[in-house]
Amino acid sequence: MSDRVYKLVEVVGTSSTGTDDAMHNAITTAAKTIRHIDWFEVVKTTGHVVDGKIAHFQVTLKIGFRLETD
């Protein structure tokens, strides 16, 4: 493995069905504009409650992507 430099961005994915879908939504959307995504870290999981039931999941991710070299 060669030496590399990474940049981190923080994104929040949401879903009404679960945390896995929220993470997939975040990565899939970020991958449309960010090249070379190599990893992610779950920073925080939150949600929205309506009438005593979970209505929406929110997952905050740090996404690491490789910077391009010359």
Image (tube, rainbow, N blue to C red):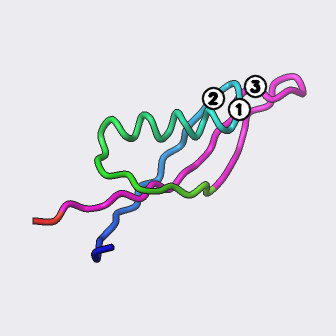
In x, y percent, where is residue 61? 54, 51
Q: Assign a secondary structure to mark 3.
A: strand
Residue 61 lies within the magenta run = yes
Question: Which residue: 34% across, 63% down?
Answer: 7
Quadrant location of the N terminus in the rendered image: bottom left
In x, y percent, where is residue 17? 70, 25
Which residue in the protein does label 1 denote?
18
Question: Which residue: 44% across, 35% down?
Answer: 28
Furthest residue in direction left, as rendered: 70
Whole-angstrom CA distance, mark 1 to mark 2, is 6 Å
Q: Assign a secondary structure to mark 1.
A: loop
Q: Amino acid at mark 3?
A: Ala
Which comes sooner in the sequence, label 2 or label 3? 2
Which comes sooner in the sequence, label 1 or label 3? 1
Task: State the predominant SS element of the stretch in magenta.
Answer: strand
Any mark on residue 15, and which?
Answer: 2
Furthest residue in direction bottom, as rendered: 3
What is the magenta range?
44-68
Q: Mark 2 or mark 3: which is in front?
A: 2
* Horizontal side, residue 8 vs residue 70: left or right: right
The residue nearer to you, when weighing 51 against 39, is: 39
Dots 1, 2 in contact, CB < 8 A: yes
In x, y percent, where is residue 6? 34, 66
The residue nearer to you, when weighing 62 against 53, is: 62
Which residue in the protein does label 3 denote?
55
Question: Which residue: 81% across, 25% down?
Answer: 50
Any mark on residue 38, and which?
Answer: none
Task: Check disc 3: other Cα within 10 Å, few if <14, some if 14-19, many if 20+.
Answer: some
Question: Which residue: 86% across, 26% down?
Answer: 53
Task: Check disc 1: other Cα within 10 Å, few if <14, some if 14-19, many if 20+.
Answer: some
Q: Amino acid at mark 2?
A: Ser
In x, y percent, where is residue 70? 9, 65
